[in-house]
Amino acid sequence: MEFKANNYNRAEIMKIIREWTELTQKDFAHRIGKSKMTVQAYERDLSSYNIDTLLEIAKEFNIEITMRKKNK
């Protein structure tokens, strides 16, 4: 499964990733070493996550992050 991240905001991206894992917010948070409240804040766009967090999540759940330069 894949999606074009450019079409989503950071909260939606986090929610999509978590939903791919088929884990609850609580279980997802535990796996990434965060609190359930932190994951909720990410998904509600009340808190920002950085690229390091995103890369750690990708590694934990075997998710590939690809960046491609668009042609003009």
Image: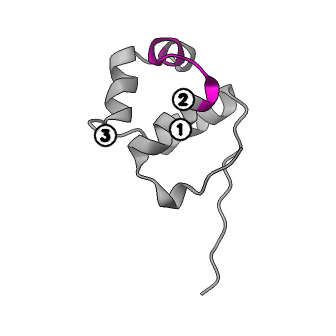
Mark closer to the chain start, 2 or 3: 2
Q: Position of residue 37 (x, y in %)?
A: 33, 18
Tag 2–tag 1 contact (CB < 8 Å): yes
- Under circle 2, the secondary element is helix
Please give left or right for residue 9 compared with residue 71 in the image: left
Give whichever of 24, 53 is nearer the camera. Answer: 24
Label 2: few (<14), some (14–19) or many (≥20) C-alpha neighbours in 10 Å: many
Residue that protrudes farthest toward the left in the picture? 46
What residue sits right under mark 1 in the picture? Answer: 16
Tell me what residue is drawn at x 56 percent, y 29 percent: 19
Quarter of the figure with the N terminus: top right
Give the amino acid type for the residue marked by disc 1 in the picture: Ile
Mark closer to the chain start, 3 or 1: 1
Please give left or right for residue 10 compared with residue 64 in the image: left
Give the amino acid type for the residue marked by disc 3 in the picture: Asp
- Give the quadrant of residue 54: top right
- Distance, label 2 to label 1, CA atoms, is 5 Å
Tell me what residue is drawn at x 39 percent, y 41 percent: 11
What residue sits right under mark 2 in the picture? Answer: 18
Tell me what residue is drawn at x 50 percent, y 16 percent: 24
User: Is 22 included in the stretch rendered in magenta?
Assistant: yes
Residue 45: numbered disc? 3
- Under circle 1, the secondary element is helix
Give the colouring mode of the picture: one colour
Identify the magenta region.
20-29
- Under circle 3, the secondary element is loop
- Distance, label 2 to label 3, CA atoms, is 14 Å
**Vertical arrangement, residue 50 with respect to residue 18, above or below:** below
